[in-house]
Amino acid sequence: MGSVNDRSRDIGKFSEQPDDDRIICRCEEVTKGEIRKAVHDGMFTMTEIRRYLRCGMGLCQGQTCAGLVKGIVAGELGISPSELGPATSRAPMRPVPMKTLGNEKGGGY
Amino acid sequence: MQNTADVVIVGGGIIGCASAYYLAKKGVSVIVLESDGSIGNGGSSRNGGGVRQSGRDPRELPMVMWGIRHLWPTLSEELGVDVEYTQKGNLRLGKTETHLKILRKLTDGAAACGLDVKMIDGDEVRRINPYLSGEVIGASWCPTDGHANPLTATLGFYKRAREMGVRFLTGEPVTRLQKRKGKIGSVITPNNVYAGEKVLVAAGYESRVIAGTVGIDIPMQKVKVECLVTEAEAYLFQQMLGTAEADFYGHQTKHGSFVFGGSTGLEPCNIDNGTPVSSSIAASCICRGIMKYFPALSDAKIIRTWAGWIDECADKIPVIGPVEEVPGMYLACGFTGHGFGISPGAAYSIAEIMTGGCPPVDLVPFRYDRFRAKI
């Protein structure tokens, strides 16, 4: 990242693959084909893919599928996975009930 | 690729993307420049998703009412992306007499503009939403309000505009604008120069800095908002919710998660280290606020928190329209935290005015030069 990303550049046509119906994000049940298609819809970053398809937005927050999604997106764009920045990790890192999270003492800064 | 187009848009948020879409529909060539690596990574993806008329400044009402009547209902079909538009009403809740006074004032103002909104008592509130606690003693109720998904709506406008030939460049921060022969000329980034007959600056708070390079200043400031998201829960309700003091708002999304925003009261003094980082106290504070209104949600698990910047204008409504001192330059910024619901109507109006057409609502209330000293 950090360099200009032209969203109109030619990444080739979308073509179906035999394992497109494989579920990649188990929490939100997003398939490989949906992820590949989203790239052709213009979703070139992990953040965009996540917001467009919800993969990585479920209970595990992408801790299981993030690497797989990144590989698929990079493959579709014809770049190395290391060129794709990660989607932002967000607190809390494990699901916490509202009554627990809201029970910290005093509300101090 | 050429660096010239009929229109250059600075900012790839929902205003920039939607304006690009409506301009492309008119056959105008458009380049959109976004400084961030991702489209819509500012306030467009960091808001409560309200598509609301009630609770707004009367000056904004005609535009948002027009959008809700003419654009929102068919937006998913039009863009080919589910924007999850849900029109099941908005409850703005009050727990004290002071709250009800605020709500009555807002309601009277909106009703005078022709909006179907009224005050209801606590029992009626609980008939509409049985999960609300007995602490709620009244609310304003607007049945034509609703909510949508800001993430898919922003990316939906982007996707459709891109399909129609709009050129989007991310990671391309605009450092300044340059006039040529008294008119808008170039849009300059660290490594490139773009040129357009017309330039739209729709870059949230950063619009202030960018417009400043051609001598135009919009009085606004950055204010932080923080939100939290629960795991998917069983269906409870479909209304959009807010409160009299605007300290808590949210809804249940189509996939079941609740998205709730709130404030700690310390936002004006929050540290600004360049990115909107969730503070350690906000989510806990929002949880306590929610549980007072919705005791039934106390076991719901929080899976994610996030924060964002509001581009808060001095008089809390946006600046939309042409800049007379710089012919060819247009502004759309300062949406003050309620820009999502109004964005299709605003973008449609911008596309009209930039192509010499007639916007569906009067843009005079949004003039950039409306700000005056108090004495």
Image (cartoon, rainbow, N blue to C red):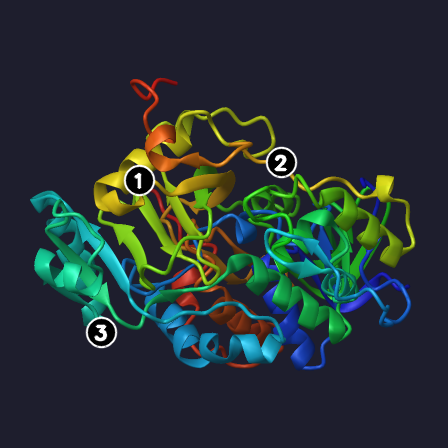
Q: Tag on residue B345?
A: none
Pointer 3: what residue? B116
Q: Position of residue B73 (x, y in %)?
A: 45, 78
| Disc 3 element | loop
Q: Amino acid at mark 2?
A: Ser
Q: Residues at badges 1 and 3 in contact (C-beta under 8 Å)?
A: no
Mark 1 closeness class: few <14, some 14–19, many ≥20 residues within 10 Å: some
Disc number lying in front (1 or 2): 1
Q: Residue at horizontal 37%, vertical 27%? A: B266
Q: In the rendered image, which residue does mark 2 sit on?
A: A89
Q: Secondary structure at mark 2?
A: loop
Position of residue B127 in the picture relative to residue B150 (left or right): left
Characterize the local packing of mark 2: few (<14), some (14-19) or many (20 or more) Cα atoms within 10 angstroms.
some
Of B203 and A25, which appears nearest the observer?
A: A25
Q: How many numbered dots are placed on residues in this image?
A: 3
Q: Chain of mark 3?
A: B
Q: In terms of depth relative to the viewer, which is nearer, A19 or B281?
A: A19
Distance between mark 1 and mark 2 Cα atoms: 24 Å
The picture places residue B83, in percent across and down from the top left corner, at 53, 68
The kind of residue tagged 1 is Ser
Tell me the residue that label 1 is attached to. B298
Residues at marks 1 and 3, CA–CA distance in whole angstroms: 33 Å
